[in-house]
Amino acid sequence: MPKEPIEYRVLRDIQAALTDIAVSAGYHHDIESIEAVKLDPDVDVEALVGPDGRRPFILLSTESETWDYGNSPEQQDSFFDLGLPITVHWVNDVTGTDDEARIEEFFRACADIEQAVGVDVTRGFLAVDTRIVRRSIAGISSTQVWVEVQLQVRIQRAFGQPNGA
C-alpha cells in the first residue's frame, strides 16, 4: 500500500500538534483528546457544538491551494511549491461576560495555536515551513468565542508524486 498523500499527512501532523495543547506543557488551555480536534466539520461535530460539548474544541478546514511551478523549464518538469491554506477554527466558552474576557480568550487561543504549530514548522520534514497569515475573531456570543487562525503550509514536491518518493 502506498503512503498517504503528503497534504493529508501534513494535516494530520497539525491535528496532532494541536492535540498536544496542555496547561502542563505551558499552554493556556487543555485539549481533552484527539476527538476535540476535528478534520471534517461534517462528521460527529454535533456532540462538540452542543452546550455540553468539549471545550475548547478545534475544527480544521482546508481551502484551495496554490501550485507554483516556477519560471524555468527544468523546474516545471520536476518540483513545484504547493501552498496549502489551513484554517484552525477554535471554539471555547468564556466565564466572564465583559469584553475583556472575550478578547483575553481570543489572544490566549491564538497564542496556543501559534505555540503548537510552531513546535515543528516542517511538519516532520513534509513541508518547507508553516506560517500564520491571519487571525480573527469569527464570532462572539455572550458565552463563547470563535477564533479563526489561517495557516499557510508551503510544501515542495515532485509533480506526479503526491505521496512522496
Image (tube, rainbow, N blue to C red):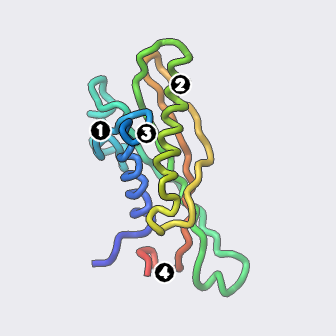
> Which image quarter holds the N terminus?
bottom left
The image quadrant that residue 76 belongs to is bottom right
- Of discs 3 and 2, which sits in the foreground? 3
Q: Would you name the residue on which mark 4 appears?
A: 160
Q: Would you name the residue on which mark 2 appears?
A: 104
Taking depth in this image into account, of 43 and 105 the one nearest to the observer is 105
Name the amino acid, label 2: Glu
Q: Would you name the residue on which mark 1 appears?
A: 32
Horizontal side of residue 39 vs 108, given as left or right: left
Q: Would you name the residue on which mark 3 appears?
A: 26
Dot 4 falls on a residue whose secondary structure is loop
- Of discs 4 and 3, which sits in the foreground? 3
Dot 1 falls on a residue whose secondary structure is loop
Whole-Å distance between the Cαs marked 1 and 4?
A: 39 Å
Dot 2 falls on a residue whose secondary structure is helix
- Of discs 3 and 1, which sits in the foreground? 3
Sequence-first disc among 4 and 2? 2
Residue drawn at x 46%, y 79% as measured from the top left: 161
Whole-Å distance between the Cαs marked 4 and 3?
A: 41 Å
> Which image quarter holds the C terminus?
bottom left
On screen, residue 77 above or below 102: below
On screen, residue 137 above or below 8: above
Sequence-first disc among 2 and 1? 1
Whole-Å distance between the Cαs marked 3 and 2?
A: 17 Å
Q: Are marks 1 and 4 in contact (CB under 8 Å)?
A: no
Q: Are marks 4 and 3 in contact (CB under 8 Å)?
A: no
Residue drawn at x 31%, y 34% as measured from the top left: 48
Sequence-first disc among 3 and 1? 3
